[in-house]
Structures are given as C-alpha cells and as structure tokens.
Image: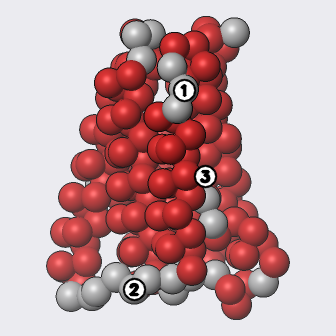
Amino acid sequence: MTKLFVVSLIGVVAAGVLAQAQTSPASAPNDLQIAMIVVTADNVDIAAGKLAAKKTSNPKVKEFAEMMVRDHTSMNDQAAQLAKKLNVTPEESPTSQSLKSDGKMNLTKLRGLSGAAFDKAYIDNEVTYHESVVKVLVDTLIPNAKNSELKALLESGRPIFESHLSHAKEVQTSLH
C-alpha cells in the first residue's frame, strides 16, 4: 500500500467523522465504512479539483487543483486495490452520504463563482479541509486504528497531509 492511500483514509474522515468521533468513540466508523468514505471523499475532491483546473486562470490554483485530482485518483486506485486484496465491500454510512451531499453543495457554490472569488472559495475550502484532516489523523484515526499495518500507514501519511496543507496555505496567501 502507498502513502497516498493513507492520505485518502485520513482525508475522507475530515468532512463528517470529526464531530462524531470526538463526541463518542463508539460513533467512529468501522473499516468497511471507512473504505466507502475514502472513495466518496476522493470522488468529491476529484470533482472539485477538475472544476478548479478548468475554471481558474491562476497558475498556482490550477497546479494545486491538478495535484489534488492526480493524488486523489491515485488514492482511489489504491483503496480499490486494498478492498480487493482484503475481499471486502465498502459500506455506506451517514458520513459517506453526508460527504456526497456536501460535495454536491460545494460544487454548486463553486460553479456560481468566477475569477478571484472562485479561486478564493476553492482554496479556502482546501485549507479548511486539510486542517481538519491533520486533526482527525492525530486525534481520531491513529489512536483508533485496530490493524497494526493500517496504524503504521496512517502514521506515515501525516507528513503528506501536512505538506498538502502547507501548499494550500501558500496558494491562499498568494491570493490575498
């Protein structure tokens, strides 16, 4: 498994699981739900990245968006390979359903924007998203991982997400 798969596992939880997991450990998703959350969150970020890559005229935003599409597509490929290897079927959860809904709302919002307003909205969302991801990784995912291989992969993914966050913040600063 690659570090990109770890990034996917971490990232997908940020959108909906953060509040649930901090409220009660019993509400944390199981492995099958995490798998569906991974695929769903990747698809949401891929869609936003594709839209941003098409709509923006800012080279920094375009580069970041293309990186998100590339990384999350790779993550989805890794998630699919892992699910096949483990012979498991991902399971819907309120979180994966919420991710789909939130992703659609975000795309609708972004489609209605253009120019600098679009760039700002897209990058601001990416910064917030990645800040949540790092927090979820440290506070929820690593401590709750049952499988030692999964735990090691989650730990190795932290620097990747911190790098994505740093890059998003750099782009955000350049927009102001």
Mark 2 → mark 3, Cα distance in angstroms: 21 Å
Labelled pair 2, 3 in contact (Cβ < 8 Å): no
| Residue 4, image x, y percentages | 35, 50
Where is mark 3, residue-wise? 133
Please give the residue where the numbered disc 2 appears in the rendered image: 91
Question: Mark 3 falls on what kind of element?
Answer: helix
How many numbered discs, if any?
A: 3
- Position of 83 compared to 11: left or right? left
Cβ atoms under marks 2 and 1 closer than 8 Å: no
Q: Which residue is mark 1?
A: 113
Q: Position of residue 57 (x, y in %)?
A: 40, 10
**Which quadrant is the N terminus positioned in?**
bottom left
Disc number for residue 149: none
Residue 150 location in percent, x, y?
Answer: 43, 72
Q: Is residue 153 visible?
A: no
Extreme residue toward the front, this view: 112
Residue at image position (35%, 25%) is 53
Query: Of the residues under marks 2 and 1, which one precedes in the sequence?
Result: 2
Q: Using the image as rendered, state which of residue 146 and residue 88 is in the foreground.
A: 88
Seen at 52% across and 32% down, the residue is 112
Q: Quadrant of the C terminus?
A: top right
Q: Earlier in the sequence, mark 3 or mark 1?
A: 1
The amino acid sitting under disc 2 is: Glu
